[in-house]
Image (cartoon, coloured by chain):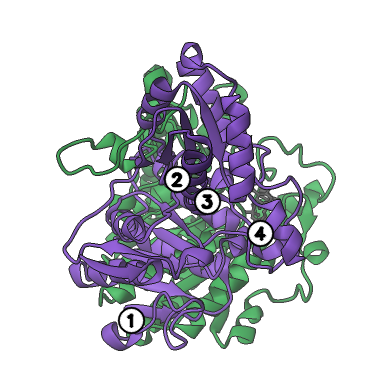
Amino acid sequence: MAVISYREALRAAMRDELNRDKNVVIMGEEVAQFNGAYKVTEGLLKEFGPKRIVDTPISEAGFIGLGIGASMLGIRPVMELMFWSFSYVAFDQIVNNAGNIRYMSGGLINCPIVIRGPANGGTNVGATHSHTPEAILASHPGIKVVCPATPYDAKGLLKAAIRDNDPVYVMENTILYNDKGEVPDEDYIVPIGVADVKRVGTDLTIVAHGRAVITSLKAAEILEKDHGVSVEVVDLRSIRPLDEETILKSVRKTHRALLVEENKPFCGVDAQVAYLIQSKAFDELDAPVHRVSSIDAPQIYCKRMEDLQMPSVERVVAEALKVLA
Amino acid sequence: MTKEAKIALYTKMARIRHFEQRCIRIYQQGKIGGFLHLYVGQEAVAAGTISLLGKNDHLITGYRDHGHGLMVGMGMNECMAELTGKVTGCSQGKGGSMHYFAPDKNYWGGHGIVGGQAPLGTGLAYAVKYQGLKGSCLTFMGDGAVNQGAVHEAYNLASLWDLPVIFVVENNGYSMGTSQERSTAHPGCLAKRAEGYNMAWDVINGHDVYEVRAKTALALKRAHEESKPTVLEIFTYRYFGHSMADPDKTYRDKEEIKTYRDKKDPVLLFEQELLREKVLTPELSQTINDAAMAEADKAAIFADESPDPTLADITKHIYWEEDNRGPKTTSRGTIIFE
Ligand SMILES: Cc1ncc(C[n+]2csc(CCOP(=O)(O)OP(=O)(O)O)c2C)c(N)n1
Ligand SMILES: [Mg+2]
């Protein structure tokens, strides 16, 4: 097993799938000649040529809609959004067209498209470039949403997404692009809809996704070392479909739950998870479910304040102690 | 065109006309819900363009989609049953009037958001080209749709990447109650916007099915042989309100409608032409129209007698993965909440 970065893992997934299936096409702004705005697609143009790796104009509604249309005829486009924040100008295509076509055609038409790119705050770029739309998109039946937190999951989930016959939206994180981890060279996928217990514990369940998993793992270490608390960290990996069983199993064991996400709290992913826990494991709980999310405001530019706006290790530790009190 | 082909084309136009006139009655009986956008008056556009399509030619349109569906060979039964929301409908009662689909006949819908289908049609053309096939995608839209950003993005991509797409603007003069003059800068010629994207364009009299065919054929040739896009603006007219919900009282006068009905009706004009050419006889025309009416009546009964989808059907066809659980499925987890 090689140790590679999250970025390299994503690239390896695309390279594998480009080799495996001639219908896979990578498309997006600056993905080819420029080697990718975040260098995720670096070298792919050289390796696969301009038919497979396609630079698009700045025209998200146009090129994503084009990818959706092409996918209906069997092409498997992997569209890069420079930021998921820019998906908002293509919202109609992403939601109405990709998300509804199978349903409205009574199952006659499939839309095997992948849209991927970073969806995160914490990079000091202000409100327009810091959106995390996983909850917004996951609220639409017909769409799948995954948020890998590690290089292993990034490669496995992206490969699963490309092979999936439904639209899958992969939300990455620029802050994680350089994170390294062990990733198998051989072919594997991470099934969409399966959460992963990233740390085993007995006193408290932390449910998280994306970079909040990394934050939570760090918090779990401090809680163990300084407070003698054994924390289990469940990484959702997939927002929709949601792995209810893994969440509930953990809560039934620890009887306490803290939900951590980098989204804004209102209608966030964890609002759904909290509802799930109270509806299916209410009697198991020894304390109310708590949440840690970003402070409910548009993303602030000032870096010092942005770091406070988003869930930090300190905030997760403090909130965990409240659940445990 | 052979004599037989001409008769077949006339028959299809007559079928569209009678199908929709039957729809009006069913709508008035309260059996069709939501929106019903009629194509009456515009038949020559779908008939002329779609009658030219071959194996690798595709099409996609907006919500005024019945004529296109019947032209590609969808049956009146499945079309009518879709309107009444029955499980025997082309989309099993999940799409409705605005969302007809027949991908087996290269018909990709049926789209409810104005202009939203333009990038999809461009993508279908991209796929045809990617697969190395000589084909095209006819992407229909209204005169109101040309002001949507998605349409302009599609124009740019189509021309930039030399895609075999033909944008067909069905200019019926109005977008709902807004006349073209009130919606569109430089209203004289919508097709001319193609020049801004370095695309070929043409304008067509949509009341004359021969002209529609002749000029569309040139665009198809351009798509097939040069892999280049075209914008065609086809002048046409709708006789009924924007949808059945439009009382049609405020934005145009009855005299205008009457003039079109009396002088420019595409079905009537084609019938007269074929009578002149001695391809049709009055008797044959009568037989064709009677058969179309009878077919529509039968479809109405079929739609009436068909069952609704079931409660369990609501959660089908959301994900391929959910509908095809088997050894090859990889996705798991819970998707559908109560
Ligand atoms: C994005 C969007 N905005 C508004 C509507 C409501 N609407 C439906 S059809 C229509 C008029 C469109 O006119 P045109 O493009 O000329 O097509 P026509 O109805 O004449 O065939 C409007 C405003 C819609 N369906 N989608
Ligand atoms: Mg119009």
Q: Is residue A248 above or below residue B290?
A: above
Q: Which mark is residue B37?
A: none
Find disc 3 in the rendering and name its residue: A215
Determine whether the beta carbon of the residue marked 4 sits less than 8 angstroms from the nearest atom of ligand 2. Answer: yes
Instruction: Determine the secondary structure under disc 4.
Output: loop
Residue A276 image offset from top left, x and y in percent: 50, 24
Residue B21 is at least partly visible in this image: no
Instruction: Classify mark 2: residues with Cα within 10 Å, few (<14), some (14-19) or many (20+).
Output: many
Q: Is residue A107 left or right of residue B237?
A: left
Residue at the disc numbered 1: A44
Same-chain status of marks 2 and 1: yes
Q: Which chain is purple?
A: A
Mark 3 residue crowding within 10 angstroms, few (<14) / some (14–19) / many (20+): many
Residues beneath discs 4 and 3 located on the same chain = no
Quick check: do tags 1 and 4 share a chain?
no
Residue receiving disc 4 = B172
**Of circles 4 and 3, which is in front?**
3
In what element is the residue under mark 3?
A: helix
**Disc 4, disc 3: CB below 8 Å?**
no
Amino acid type, residue under disc 1 in the picture: Leu
Mark 2 residue type? Ile
Disc 1 to disc 3, how far (Cα)?
32 Å
Chain letter for the part of the structure drawn in green: B
Q: Counting residues from the N terminus, which is met first, the one under dot 3 or under dot 2?
A: 2
Cα–Cα span, label 2 and label 4: 36 Å
Give the chain letter at badge 3: A
